[in-house]
Image (tube, grey):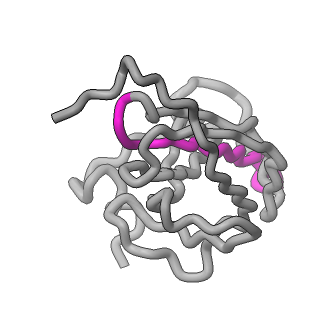
Amino acid sequence: MHGMFRANGGCGYVRKPEHLTRPSDQLIDPKTTFPVRKTLKIFIVGVPADEAKRKTKVIEDDWVPVWDEAFAFPSTLPELALLRIEVWEYDMHVKDNFAGQTCLPIPELKSGIRSVPMHDKKGVKYRNVGLLMFFETEDVELPIHHDRIHHF
């Protein structure tokens, strides 16, 4: 209903795209496509020892991006850890465009292929938007260092 006026917090001011502000004789060919590139940012949020951040390579938009990358996140306290996944788009007009997010408790993750729903910045679930991801969880017994155990 409000079209472009929803941009910039709904204040009514929308900055012109860069190609409209450059003085040039060249007009934009309406048949030209501007590729949208996507990347995933993956975070582990929890106790400071567990916190981590990874980023996938950038994929050119082909409607079905496939990153085919694997990340391993060791965790000392998985009961307090969250897996946060963000999708970002990069195009000719805006450097970073937030596209979606999800946040999952690590203890709730099950091994296997999962459909992960995506949400907007406010946490509202997108309809029919998700990531197909493979999770592999494993419990690893760490050696106990008796000199680091505190008795209360």
On the question of residue 58 being in view, the answer is yes
Query: Which residue is rendered at x = 50% and y = 57% of the image?
Result: 106
> 133 above or below 147?
below
> 41 above or below 66?
above
**Residue 71 at x, y percent in the picture:** 70, 40
The one of 97 and 24 positioned closer to us in this rendering: 97
Whether residue 20 is in magenta: the answer is no
The one of 108 and 6 positioned closer to us in this rendering: 108
**Residue 128 at x, y percent in the picture:** 61, 81
Which quadrant is the N terminus positioned in? bottom left
Q: In this view, does 141 lie to the left or right of 122?
A: right
**Residue 59 at x, y percent in the picture:** 78, 44
> 100 above or below 29?
below
Q: Is residue 136 left or right of residue 118?
A: right
Whether residue 43 is in magenta: the answer is yes
Q: Is residue 101 left or right of residue 36?
A: left
**Residue 112 at x, y percent in the picture:** 75, 68
Extent of the magenta region: 29-48
Query: Which residue is rendered at x = 71% and y = 48% of the image?
Result: 36
